[in-house]
Image (cartoon, rainbow, N blue to C red):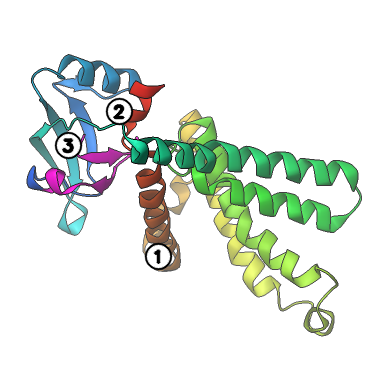
Amino acid sequence: MPFIYNGKQVISISPEGKETGIEIGDKILAMNGQTLESESVWGEELSKNRESGQINLTIERQIENEQIQTKELTVPLIKIEKDFSFYAKLVVGFVFVYFVPLFCILIGFWVVFVRVHDFLAWLLLFLLLGFSCIGLESYGSRTLIGAYAQIFFSTWAVSMLLFGIYFPERLNLDIKFPWLKWIIIVPLGLQMILIFLNLFSNFTGIGLTDFLKPFNGILNLAAVPLNMESRKKRGRLSIAASLMGEKSSVSELL
């Protein structure tokens, strides 16, 4: 495929893909009329259309004023050359997406197991759990791995702040003004609570955040820094995607 799709949106496009009209941020609703409900549909439709060399996509695109536009596109299938570069990207992607998260999780829990009463050991655990999520951002929020990534990404900032304050010893500034850190911790804590409530709603269908709808304007203003962070995440996703190669090529090899 001339683009990379993370299950939620298009995150990277090749020059060939730009000619078809597809754009970064597009959400794929269907392939050849088949609703894209799972990765199995993705693989099946790609296999059926190898000979024809193209595939029909139904995409959803957000345009101005938050309006949604639906389009039908015909996208060519690109043959992937399995050369050294292909396998190098596959290996680096495997390390980034699988090895690094697992390594961070194991090291974090090992430190806590050895120093279970050490406050810094617990801070280090949350630091490593947050770091382990960098390679997991492509998973949807309705998956367990995606929920894990959202939870520990939201706790990462607080754990980094506290680790910086207390390691290797408590900062003199915090000793003199212990209330100062709460100016940062409180809004970050509210952000974590909202993320937990949204995840709970995603998995249960219970709208625990519906009561916040009257305050959407205020929340949108407060979310500006978070939107900037989301753009950074998309940048990291593009890097991860380029390392992993196209989803179809990875699944074909494995």
Identify the residue at horizontal 20%, vertical 46% (top origin).
Answer: 14
- What is the magenta range? 1-18
Query: How far is disc 1 from disc 3 in space, using C-alphas?
Result: 25 Å
Is residue 83 shown left or right of residue 150? Answer: left
Q: Position of residue 114 (x, y in %)?
A: 89, 44
Indicate whether 238 appears above or below 53.
below
- The residue labelled by disc 1 is 228
- The residue labelled by disc 3 is 59
- The residue labelled by disc 2 is 248
The kind of residue on which mark 3 rests is Ile
Of mark 1 and mark 3, the one earlier in the sequence is 3
Is residue 48 visible from the viewing direction of this image? yes
The local crowd at label 1, few if under 14, some if 14 to 19, many if 20 or more residues have their Cα within 10 Å, is: few
Identify the residue at horizontal 45%, vertical 33% (top origin).
Answer: 142
In the image, farthest residue toward the front = 84
Is residue 84 shown left or right of residue 188? Answer: left
